[in-house]
Image: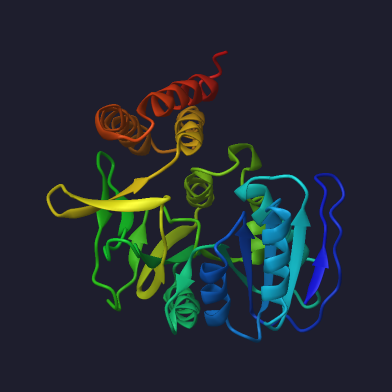
Amino acid sequence: MTTSQPSPSEPIFITATAPGDLATVTVTFNPSLAELQAQLHVLPAHCIKVIVDNASKPDIWEEVVALAGKFQNIHLIRSETNLGLAAALNYGVDWLATLTPTPQFVLLLDQDSEPQPGSIATLLAGFGQLRAKGHKVGCVGPLLADPDTGLTHGFHQSTRWRWTRAYPLAGTATPVPCANLNGSGTLVPLALFQQLGGLDEALFIDHVDTEWAFRVMAHGYSLWGIPSAVFAHSMGQASVRFWLLGWRVWPVRPPHRHYYLYRNAAMLMKRPYVPMVWKTWAAIKLLFTTLVMAITGPSRWQQIKNMWYGLRQGFGKK
């Protein structure tokens, strides 16, 4: 296990050897040690695993260090301030790019995502099979299963006029063409990640994966879901299920997360490479979310205040 401490201007890197084809980058912020341990247990022992910590509490950071010491090939990067999800992932990938040889693929992970046995190998195989068939593959991602409800989040798809989700059964062998992939579980060639400039750090946390997906596709690459690869993953603090032409998962989020969701959605609506179908869908979803939170949400007035402030910030209003 090795450690370094980055600053926004001068990250400190170290050297390592024989990274192999795959490396992983996990971002932590006051993580559940049980969830992080479960993730580390299923990551391949031979691959380099980077943990970038976004200023967790000192006692939790000490527990992360102690936990990491129980596993092989882990490199810890500690930030004294919360840089945000995008910047933290970029730091991790930048460090991997200094290795010789450089890993071919990087798997991006949230701290609470747990790949099911065999799923990482399945992602790698799926990427290779799609590329062998002539597809210009940018990223592949797993089918995400919500641990609270047992439901899957499905895969985003779109036509010219509709933004939809496909819900293949877990274990389905056929890859699913996607219009977007959730960030956690995204498998991407490290060279492509750097070629496209990494993740947009101005977004901080929410819709980081959305912007990345649209930028990947704008450069002519395709996105694919691999339903035979399954990761357990939560979208919010908790999840509830509701009926809308089938059971769906509704993530429960704190007010500050709705600030970023609304701000970043507004920011993306101004970008020319973001499809109009997504902009339309996003506006409808934001309105629906506002109504739901105004009627039933916890801390509803704080939620509405943060949503409104986020929209104003996103559209450049003071």
Query: Where does residue 93 sit, x and y in percent of width and height?
Result: 70, 61
Residue visible at 41% across and 70% down? Answer: 231
Residue visible at 25% across and 58% down? Answer: 166
**Horizontal side of residue 235 vs 9, given as left or right:** left
- From the image, which quarter does the C terminus lie in? top right
**Horizontal side of residue 72 vs 285, given as left or right:** right
Residue visible at 35% across and 35% down? Answer: 298
Q: Which residue lies furthest to the left in this view?
A: 245
Q: Which residue lies furthest to the top in this view?
A: 318
Query: Where does residue 181 sit, x and y in percent of width and height?
Result: 43, 56
Q: Residue furthest front?
A: 59
- From the image, which quarter does the N terminus lie in? bottom right
171 or 288: which is nearer to us? 288
Q: How is the image coloured?
A: rainbow
Inspect this view and state whether residue 266 appears: yes
Query: Where does residue 20 sit, x and y in percent of width and height?
Result: 68, 82
306 or 108: which is nearer to us? 306
Q: Quadrant of residue 65?
A: bottom right
**Horizontal side of residue 227 vs 241, given as left or right:** right
Inspect this view and state whether residue 195 appears: no
Query: Where does residue 134 sit, x and y in percent of width and height?
Result: 44, 71
**Horizontal side of residue 10 vs 278, given as left or right:** right
Q: Quadrant of residue 47?
A: bottom right
